[in-house]
Image (spheres, rainbow, N blue to C red):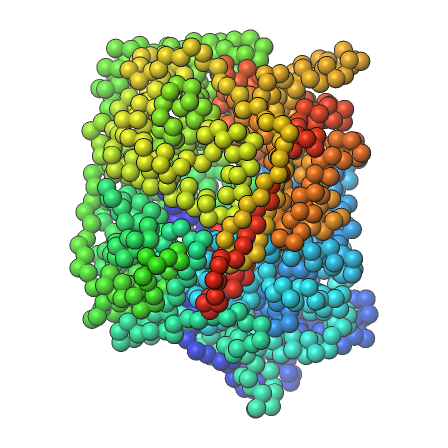
Amino acid sequence: MRFQVATAIIATTLVTGIHAFSFVPSRGASSIATIPRSKQQSTRNKNGLVMKDESASKFSLSNLFSGDGAAASSASLRGSATLEPHPSKRDHINPLNALYPPNRQSTEASDAAASPPLPFHPAVQSGILDNGFSYVFLPNRSPPGRFEAHLQVFSGSSDELEPQQGIAHLTEHVAYMGSRKRERLFGTGSQTNAYTDFHHTVFYAACPTVAPGGRGVPMLPMALDALCDVIEARCDPARIEKERQAVLSEMTMVNTIEYRVECQILSTLHRENRLAKRFPIGKESLIQSWMQDDVKTWHRTHYRPDNVLLYVVGDLDPEDVQKTIQEKFGHLTAERQGSQIKLPELKKEASDLADAVVGGTMKQAQSWHYPPVRHDFCVGEGVKDVLDAAGDAGQLIVAEKAESDISVYDIHLQQPYDLDDKVQFLKEAEMGPGKIIRPHIFKHELLQNFSFHLFAKRPVEPIKDMASFRRGLARRVCLAALQIRLNVGGRSDDPAFTFVEFNQLDSAREGCAVCSLDMTSEPERWEEAVEKSISEIRKLGLFGVTPGEMERYASALLTDAEQLAAQGDMISHSDQLAYLMETVANGHTFMSPEQSYTVTEQALSTLTLEEVNEAAAELCSHITGLKDGEVTSEGVLVAVACTPKSALMDIDEDKLCAAIRRACILDVEPVEDVTVPHTLVTAEELDQATADHPPKWEPGHFSDGTPDTPADRITRPFTLRRLGNGMKVGISQNAAESQRGHLRLVAPGGRDAEERLGFKSGSLAVGARAMQEGGSFGRFTREQVELFAVDHLIMVEINCNEEALTMDFVFPTTNVGNSGYGDEKQLGITGTESVLQIVREILVDFNWEEDALGRSKQSYRTAHESLGKSLEGKSTEMIMEAVASSDQRFLSIGVDTVNAVTLEDATNAVMSQLIPSDLEISVSGDFVVNDVLDMILKYLGTIPADINSQYKVEEKSHDFSGVPALQLPGKHLDLELEDSDPRAVAYVAGAAPNSWGFLADGSTVAQRVSEADKRASDYDKQRRAHPLFANAALSLVSEIANRRLFSTVRERKQLTYDANFSLTGFERLKGGWFLVTVTASKEKAQAALEACKETLEALRRTNPISPDNLESAKRVVLNRHEGELRTSSYWATMMSGIQEESIPLKGPLSVTDFHAVIESMTTKDLQLTLDCMGLEEKELYTAIGKTVQPEGLVDDGIVKASATAGVGRGGALRG
């Protein structure tokens, strides 16, 4: 059941979060615009920005663009009157974009009848201090009593000069980690961090509004002090050295094969601009060489008031916010920063770069948030390039220089430089008249599958009025329709691709919108996969969407907007901030959820099929136009294929282009609408089921000492009962996620049951995945069921782990599958009812399909083979195999094991777990509990108690076994993996309790603590007897261990970027393991491992847990718990197992007493809990995995593996 809808496409927000992977097209060859200064004077462009008139005008760009006018140079600003102007500060567009006060006033005053402007969020406030410092504040009360502040510096790796590659990231580390004022936030329940990307560096603090301790001290001044401290960073040599080592370790850590693939993609996509040569991680040789003056020169060049933007979102008073911002940042001046730039040669070159940035880049032409780039855009015929249009409007500012100097500066880095990575790329090729493609092949021995990426870059269209808003909605309808076609209709009995996605996203980090096709397949089927995926896109471009698709996805968009509006001020600070930052960055109008819903309904009520199909033709024009005789977009397509380095993979750039060409000339036919059921279970069927098996409620029963709960009353914080057929039910109301719900079905067993019940190894896991890949119920086909789920916005995920089969359903709680608008709207059934119908059909009428099993087996084969090519994956498997004594329950499922599973094996194993009396259903959401209880009684209570009993396997004991006893003494393991780049990872592992304190021998943490503390008071004995005691102690121990590893291995010894302590966290299996993971250079791997062991030993003996350690950990654990309580998925997880006998200590008390138990913990409790783990030297298992260069490795001209900007596609480097 691949019900996962591409939420990035359906979501109501108009722009993507900064974590989204979005690539954007570039413009053709262009140099810096050369507009004479005389033509720029007294010119007002369309954005209401006044160009500088040096004669009589009293306006200045400093005042109008960045607010840093005459007042900023007044003597009142700490001596700025006596300082020279900052060498890199230029008049530029204000980063507030649509929220820049003159722009906002102009928009709100517009009376354009043809396309009225979109409304601004009524509560959002923005302003500019006299020194040019810009800020945005959005009041928000979710959660109450907290706020977030993000300081965005508009300089990232793309702003670096040739000898500065990587310095933006290093400076972020130095400024963040070297802030003494940030350290004052420790122990207050605050979280801080920082990250660097192509286009910016961001520092943030998430804090309570009042400091703990009962004194009522406001936290906003402290948070802003910390953020201001990074602008005034001291750049101490000792801190630089510490962070140098951390960054070098991070360089090794991030250099996975996934990073290298992203590096290849980005460097090909952005070949015409700086992004191809300015990845945030930088150059190792340069990072090793920088001294204090280097770091301080970068910092003082870019960390200045006109080049930052502060966002504050939270439960704060607007007047206090504005007053505090003025107090904390008003004294800053660019002149003072500039006076501390120490390296004159870099000062001069940075000044030249600054001239070029405002003279010919997207940063000045469209948004100061964008990197200083140009793009080879792929747009319709006659569409004017963004930079040309900005030049004509007088928005680009060209410095007055000698004629010989104009446009000479190579801002787009098209010339070769000494530090460039060695690259061999096929030059752009013509696919036909006016049809240009830039292909590239990346081959590597660590790649397992073939992946294909086809891009077209387009300008970001600011969403400011109804016309642009309608176009945005039309594009989203098209994208949703195509993605579902690819997921549902495109998956044949033997699909050519294993993953495919087509999307277009605005990307501030790249300064454009990127239309992308991303696809993976088995290597030997790459040509078939390219043909199939491109054909589906061509169908959309040529024929558009069907009427049924139009209704389906327009309805989904409206429902999603309605849900967002219903959340109102319950949207979290972090979600509001992410949306606000991306909206501002791309120049969109920032609306409230309620405004967005009103505008969405208004637009969709009149949106026509013709408009949507026009959007489809535009979206796909770069592909449909590759066929001779068809109109194409003008510009460059980018095609990247990543393949295993194998003699069997006979592919090069020419063959890739030929395959694309063949796919584009195939004839395609329009799709036909599928008849989608409005309900999976008819009223007649339910009536019959009720008559045959009358449902009833029975009391809830628990094993933690809580009395049975009544079968006829609602209880708080959750209602816990059982159905007459034995199914356990838990329900909680959670209004924090408005109109959303989460249902979790748990069948205890998992891979432990494979062994315990005598099923073929791997059959439960492979069967669970086959159920996910299938989805046919009774008389309905898989396509009908999946479209039913799409219509009702339901997402389903089915998994099997070591101890349970779980099914997770995310759904709307309101009426969905509606049709029509306004008074003519016809309501469908609720999402809650829809999901219960699906659960019922899974249990009573699921159709097992051979092709679904085939897809499941292929997925497991790929995962296992990929594990063998991952240093982290293979090393983790090695140490887990050692500590688990090769027990297959805890290891990856091998290819031979997967291949041996038949459809009968999978069916018997999975269905044996789906006996009603063994199941537990946990539901949380924004609904009326009584209504949901009635629906559960109707749909699940009428399932016969003996359903699936033909699959049941009788067992002597229902008890779960424990993990294998750890073989002592421990041992050290080494692993080598062939890879062209040097990397290493180290591990320390040992025995640990499970989540509830049970050890492998059956004893418990509580028992061992009691035996070790014979003189414990009656109060302590009572505390430690609480069912949650061990769970709480282990949570705190994990938090403290992670903090100690950070301070010792990273901060003091400077051996790694990060070290992590984790527990396996089993709930039913007795026992488990702890695992410390540390990434380091090959040379430092052994030292890093020893430092981790030393840290654990110190925690036990020489430097035990202090009261401060404990209090800080309590704040973190409690704050995390409070934050997660706002999510329905967390409630569903907490309720799962509460009525399950196989988790005897988990009951209602584990939720109701959480705060009290955490607060009651003492340092002695935690020290005694540590003694329950296998932390002695003889009990430890250690391992080091290292890469070794393959024999006969030759330089093939491939781009060296520089880590790109994030895990996954489009992320930033976290400080």
Image quarter of residue 632: bottom left
341 left or right, relative to 408: right
Residue at 78 percent across and 51 percent down: it is 180
Q: Is 220 rendered above or below residue 399? A: above
- Looking at the picture, how far across and down is residue 361, in whole percent? 52, 73
Residue at 82 percent across and 70 percent down: it is 79
- Looking at the picture, how far across and down is residue 815, in whole percent? 35, 33
Comparing 315 with 1107, the one in front is 1107
Q: Is 29 rendered above or below residue 209? A: below
Residue 277 visible somewhere in the drawing: yes
Residue furthest front as drawn? 1191
Residue 99 visible somewhere in the drawing: no
- Looking at the picture, how far across and down is residue 1192, in whole percent? 47, 62
Q: Quadrant of the N terminus?
A: top left
- Looking at the picture, how far across and down is residue 336, in whole percent? 77, 69
Residue at 77 percent across and 13 percent down: it is 1014
* Marker count (numbered): 0
Q: Is 1113 rendered above or below residue 464? A: above
Comparing 194 with 50, the one in front is 194
Residue furthest bottom as drawn? 403
Comparing 340 with 267, the one in front is 267
Residue at 44 percent across and 58 percent down: it is 444
64 left or right, relative to 588: right
388 left or right, relative to 1144: left
